[in-house]
Image (cartoon, rainbow, N blue to C red):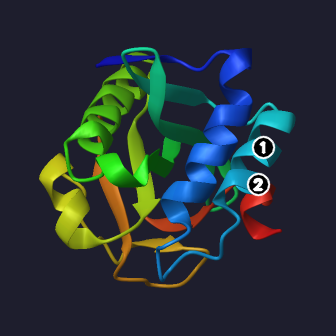
Amino acid sequence: MQIRDERPSDVEVIHDLTRMAFAPMPFSAGDEQDLILALRADNALALSLVAVLGEELVGHIAFSRVLIDGNVCDWFDLGPVSVRPELQSLGIGSALIRSGLERITSMGAAGCVLLGYPTYYCRFGFLHDPELRYNGEVNPNFQQLTLRGDTPKGSVTYHPAFYV
């Protein structure tokens, strides 16, 4: 498997892959693929990686910048991450997450946040910190990974595309 930056020719495949990956998920609103399009259209995808197996695109991960207490910072959001449904639980998503975290670290990231299952994301070092809140609210599924420096305190706000 190869992990690489997305290419313009991947956009439609990423859209379809994301829709298929999230369709059976009970927590999904079914709009993750539209979120990626909106982030791309606003030039807000800080990093977009794909996993390719043979010639087939089988996974995708997106990272975008966040604000903390309304201030620009070196923190990113991880997500969404998608894997073809029939290939889930084979390590493709984990490989995308690890590769993405390495890449944002090399880009100067101080940390990364996400909204997801703690039992899954703790293997990558993510943990819940009630001092770092999701849109001002404490949410046990909102997690952070400090990559350098101190963990900030405050309210994290995502790109406006997340709130449409």
**Which residue is rendered at x = 71% and y = 65% of the image?**
31
Residue 64 placement, left or right of 40: left
Q: Which residue is mark 1?
A: 37
**Which residue is rendered at x = 22% and y = 53% of the image?**
89
Q: Quadrant of residue 162?
A: bottom right
Q: Quadrant of residue 131?
A: bottom left
**Looking at the image, which is closer to me, 159 or 121?**
121
On the question of residue 150 being in view, the answer is no
Residue 89 sits above or below residue 58 on the image: below
The disc label shown at residue 15, or none? none
User: Could you say whether the residue bearing mark 1 is in a helix, strand or loop?
Assistant: helix
- What amino acid is at disc 1? Leu
Q: Which residue is mark 2?
A: 34
Task: Report how many numbered discs are placed on residues in the image.
Answer: 2
Q: How many neighbours does mark 1 have within 10 angstroms: few (below 14), some (14-19), or many (20 or more)?
A: some
- What amino acid is at disc 2? Asp
Q: Position of residue 141 (x, y in %)?
A: 37, 76
* Marks 2 and 1, how far apart at CA: 5 Å
Residue 131 placement, left or right of 78: left
**Looking at the image, which is closer to me, 55 or 145?**
55
**Looking at the image, which is closer to me, 106 or 52?**
52
User: Could you say whether the residue bearing mark 2 is in a helix, strand or loop?
Assistant: helix
Q: What is the quadrant of the C terminus in the image? A: bottom right
Q: Position of residue 133 (x, y in %)?
A: 48, 74
Q: Position of residue 61 (x, y in %)?
A: 48, 39
Q: What is the quadrant of the N terminus in the image? A: top left
Q: Quadrant of residue 55?
A: top left
Residue 86 sits above or below residue 163 on the image: above
